Structure formats: C-alpha cells, structure tokens
C-alpha cells in the first residue's frame, strides 16, 4: 500500500537559463542533436507493494540496495520508505561538465531493494519539433533518450513515477516523467522546468518561454502525470 504523500513545497527558482551545461550549446527548441544510444541496463522493477498496472511483458529486475553504486547521492524530499539517488557514472572527466552520464535510482530503503530508473544520454535527440503546439501534450520517448538528470523528484501523489530533468543544451530544461514499473518515459514540452507540484490533484506545473512581438515571456502550464496539457496558470510574465 502506498504511503500518503505529504504536500511538496513549491520550488522557488524559475529556470531563466541553464547552469552547468552538460552538452553542446544549441539555440533553443527546434535544433537537432545527433543521437548515440547509450547502453541502459538494470531497468524495470518490482518493488515491494502493489504491482497492478505493471507491464507483464517487461522482465522485472530488482536489485539489492547494496548493488547500487556507493557513490550514488541520496536526493532531497524522500517519500519514506522510498528515496531517489543519482550517481555520476563518469567522474574520470574531472568535472568538465561535457557529456556527463548519470544514473537515477529508486530505492525502497525499508525493503532494501533498488531499481535503476534510467541512465542519461548526453547526445539524446531533441524532440522540440514534435512538440510545436503552444499547449501540446508530452510525448513518448525511449529510455535511451533521457538527456540529463540535474534534478530528480517523485511525481506528485505517485511514488511509482519519477520526474527527471536537466539542461543538456545550455538553454532549455528537458523534463521527463518516467514510470520505471512499465519502463516508459514522457517528455514534457516545457522548456524551463518544473516550478511546483500538487500531490492532491496529481498535477505538475512547469514553465515555458515563448517569444512575441514585444519580447520574451514565461508561461506556467499544468500537466497531468500522463503528460497531458491541462491549462495555463496565471498570466504570462515578461522576462
């Protein structure tokens, strides 16, 4: 039985551009990146608890928590007994910030089990051309095309889903909703990242920028956990 999730605190920082870019600097949505499918292993899970809705065609791989890399860093805002960890997979580059690869882990600390949610691919393909509409829904992407994991968090009201986002192109925040139980991922059309979460309504509020005749504006949009666009929230804000 899933534990009742406490209300997330609002994230107070609106992404006005990316810090610590992790890949080639591109000029916003619509640019094309070359793709290299990095090997992703250890995906899917069957954590202790309700397994309804799990794709039975996908082999479940559950690891002992001791098999998670010792260098993985526990992330803020755990949902006991669940916690998220991020591991830097290639520290040999001395922190250059280019083409870094990270793995994301979902642990049941009480049961002592863990699954690998995803491994980032710094050459993941940009999907902006598939999300051209102002109020478009999220789109399905392969787990081999998760570009970055600068921050991770539980989906609001559902610890079975994980939000992973990062800034691989020096300009845009790429945001994904990953269901490790089903081995699926959605990318939101947001270009500036998650601003707040509503666990009660199970809604994600993410920011996007857009250009009009008199300049650049930021718009806050609400999405469901299935990546569906729900509505714009509040007024657009001039940058």
Image: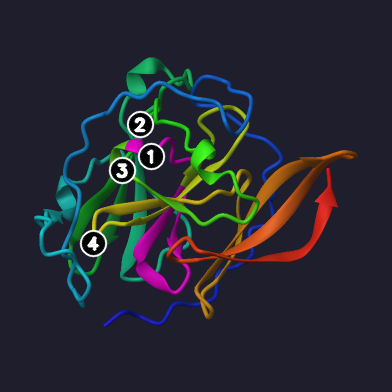
Cβ–Cβ under 8 Å for marks 2 and 1: yes
Nearest the viewer among 222 and 41 is 222
Q: Earlier in the sequence, mark 2 or mark 1?
A: 2
**Residue identifier under label 2:** 121
Q: Quadrant of the N terminus?
A: bottom left
Instruction: State which tag comes first along the sequence, 2 or 4.
Output: 2
Q: Earlier in the sequence, mark 4 or mark 3?
A: 3
Residue ID at (42%, 31%):
125
Question: Which circle marks residue 181 in the picture?
Answer: 4
Task: Give how far apart the Cα atoms at labels 3 and 1 are.
Answer: 8 Å
Q: Residues within 10 Å of mark 1 (few under 14, many from 20)?
A: many
Can you identify the residue that label 3 sits on?
Answer: 142
Q: Between label 3 and label 1, give the one nearer the viewer.
A: 3
Q: In whole angstroms, how far apart are the C-alphas of marks 4 and 3?
A: 14 Å
User: Dot 2 lies on which element?
Assistant: loop
Residue at x 23%, y 61% (from the top left corner): 181
> Which residue carries the number 1 mark?
146
Q: Is residue 81 left or right of residue 57?
A: right
């Amino acid at each position: 039985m899933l534990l009742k999730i406490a209300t997330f605190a609002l994230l107070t920082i609106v992404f006005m551009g990316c810090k610590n870019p992790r890949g080639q600097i591109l000029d916003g949505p619509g640019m094309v990146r070359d793709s290299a499918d990095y090997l992703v292993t250890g995906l899917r899970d069957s954590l202790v608890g309700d397994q309804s809705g799990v794709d039975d065609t996908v082999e479940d791989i559950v690891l002992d928590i001791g098999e998670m890399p010792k260098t993985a860093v526990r992330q803020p805002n755990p949902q006991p007994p669940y916690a998220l960890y991020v591991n830097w997979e290639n520290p040999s580059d001395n922190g250059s910030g280019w083409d870094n690869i990270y793995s994301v882990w979902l642990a049941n600390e009480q049961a002592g089990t863990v699954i690998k949610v995803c491994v980032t691919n710094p050459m993941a393909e940009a999907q902006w051309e598939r999300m051209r509409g102002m109020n478009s829904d999220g789109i399905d992407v392969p787990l081999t095309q998760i570009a970055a994991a600068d921050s991770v968090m539980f989906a609001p009201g559902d610890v079975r889903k994980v939000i992973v986002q990062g800034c691989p192109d020096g300009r845009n925040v790429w945001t994904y909703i990953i269901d490790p139980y089903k081995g699926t991922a959605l990318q939101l059309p947001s270009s500036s990242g998650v601003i707040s979460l509503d666990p009660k309504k199970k809604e994600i509020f993410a920011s996007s920028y857009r250009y009009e005749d008199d300049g650049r504006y930021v718009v806050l949009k609400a999405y469901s956990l299935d990546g569906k666009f729900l509505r714009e929230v509040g007024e657009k804000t001039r940058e």
